[in-house]
Image (cartoon, grey):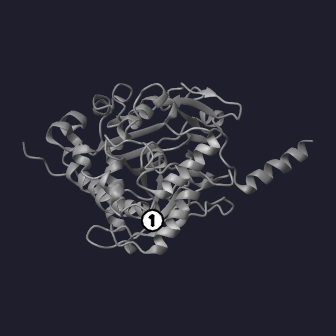
């Protein structure tokens, strides 16, 4: 059946950046992706390896610029995301809802309220495309007909994220770990046959004031991503906070046509803990952005489904030394408990499915430090609690009000 012409999309108008000047910004390293060259992106300057290696072993987050798409091309993707939420019927969204708890996959629409934090339902709506979603069979099963004419554009964008941006990042990280430059890429290539990569459009609806107050302005609990590399397409609403090495939450500042890159659990595991999986969360924006609805685009890259998450001790001296240090401090390796039961070390696909099924289902228990902790495949998985960081002038104003009241 021929595909109809794509619908005329309303343009996405970027929200105005916040004008607040007293916010705590995260001091992140910036990677110029244009410096990584060659037909297979294997020419990486030593300075890039050094700077990015330090950032990912210390902060876990970086900016990336000069990725190769124009701002107008990026705005088109935001317009597609806007259409997917505002112009697709609620009945179609329900019909193509992701079967998250049964499959351990987010592919399809995720409705608001699937996750809960302290009894409060989330207000985040998502549309997720898996790297294997674009076959004729899968697209009919997973997505409404109103999106089918947009799928070639969506697939092209997903492929660019994987084949260009991710491949460049993996070249750098392979060299950081003193592996052959294409080593990590070889664990990740052919996603449309072997992979579980996820392209996500997400709309963050504003919670009721009472729910926002119950959670201290936190709209997505502090967490680590499950995958190897996460790519966030920067947008102006100031809501992303990262937990920095000094244990302080700081906001990530928007840059037009830039990326925010972080690493997840899978990369942390295979690097023996050398590369940091980042703790981050989403909070209520500054007051001058409170009337906006936050629209986000994310690309979550995974190693192929069957790649073991056993640390690469034999392949990398960097990993071997980092993992030995970790075992000395923690008293055990990542997967010792699993192996003691005679079970196999999880693959990237196993870990993804386990975490997807468990996330936001309130199986965790409250620890003494106030965070939520649950065990998954022998790993302690933490949901990080605590109120959003208040602007300095708001904090000072509250102090003055308290003094006057006394």
Residue visible at 40% across and 60% down in the picture: 179
- Seen in the picture, residue 63 relative to 140 is either above or below; the reply is below
Q: Residue furthest right?
A: 406
Q: Is residue 142 visible?
A: yes
* Residue 327 occupies quadrant: top right
- Residue 361 placement, left or right of 128: right
Quarter of the picture containing the N terminus is top left
Q: Nearer the viewer, residue 127 or 301?
A: 301
Residue closest to the far front:
314
Is 368 drawn above or below residue 205 in the view shown? above
Q: Position of residue 35 (x, y in %)?
A: 39, 74
Q: Position of residue 99 (x, y in %)?
A: 33, 28
- Which residue is at the front of the view, 198 or 330? 330
Q: Going by the image, does 46 lie left or right of 305?
A: right
Task: Please tell me which residue is depicted at 57% across the width and 27% down the height of the picture.
Answer: 364
Asked if residue 285 lies left or right of residue 339, the reply is right
Q: Relative to residue 64, is residue 308 depicted above or below?
A: above
| Residue 177, position as x, y percentages in the image | 46, 59
The residue wearing badge 1 is 64
Q: Between 85 and 105, which is closer to the camera in this rendering?
A: 105
**In the depicted structure, whether residue 270 falls above or below residue 174:** above
In x, y percent, where is residue 21?
Answer: 66, 63
């Amino acid at each position: 059946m021929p595909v109809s012409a794509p619908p005329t999309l309303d343009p996405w108008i970027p929200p105005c950046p916040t004008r607040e000047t007293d916010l705590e910004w995260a001091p992140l390293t910036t990677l110029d992706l244009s410096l990584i060259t060659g037909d297979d992106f294997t020419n990486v300057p030593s300075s890039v390896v050094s700077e990015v290696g330090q950032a990912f072993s210390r902060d876990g987050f970086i900016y990336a610029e000069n990725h190769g798409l124009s701002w107008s091309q990026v705005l088109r993707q935001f317009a597609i995301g806007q259409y997917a939420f505002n112009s697709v019927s609620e009945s179609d969204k329900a019909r193509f809802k992701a079967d998250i708890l049964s499959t351990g996959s987010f592919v399809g629409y995720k409705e608001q309220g699937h996750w809960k934090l302290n009894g409060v339902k989330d207000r985040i709506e998502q549309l997720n495309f898996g790297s294997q979603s674009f076959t004729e069979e899968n697209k009919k099963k997973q997505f409404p007909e109103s999106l089918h004419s947009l799928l070639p554009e969506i697939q092209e964008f997903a492929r660019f994220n994987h084949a260009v941006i991710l491949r460049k990042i993996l070249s750098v990280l392979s060299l950081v770990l003193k592996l052959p430059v294409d080593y990590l890429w070889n664990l990740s290539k052919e996603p449309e046959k072997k992979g579980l990569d996820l392209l996500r459009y997400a709309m963050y609806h504003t919670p009721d004031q009472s729910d926002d107050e119950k959670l201290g302005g936190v709209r997505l609990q502090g967490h680590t991503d499950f995958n190897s590399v996460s790519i966030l397409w920067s947008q102006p609403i100031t809501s992303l906070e990262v937990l920095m090495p000094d244990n302080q939450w700081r906001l990530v500042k928007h840059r037009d046509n830039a990326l925010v890159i972080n690493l997840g659990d899978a990369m942390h595991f295979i690097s023996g803990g050398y590369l940091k999986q980042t703790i981050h969360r989403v909070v209520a924006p500054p007051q001058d952005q409170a009337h906006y609805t936050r629209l986000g685009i994310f690309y979550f890259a995974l190693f192929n489904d069957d790649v073991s998450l056993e640390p690469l001790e034999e392949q990398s001296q960097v990993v071997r030394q980092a993992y030995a240090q970790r075992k000395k401090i923690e008293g055990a390796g990542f997967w010792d408990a699993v192996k003691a039961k005679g079970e196999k070390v999880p693959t990237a696909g196993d870990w993804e499915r386990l975490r997807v099924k468990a996330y936001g289902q309130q199986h965790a228990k409250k620890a003494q430090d106030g965070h939520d902790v649950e065990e998954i495949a022998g790993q302690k998985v933490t949901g990080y609690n605590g109120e959003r960081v208040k602007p300095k002038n708001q904090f000072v104003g509250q102090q003055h009000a308290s003094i006057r009241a006394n």
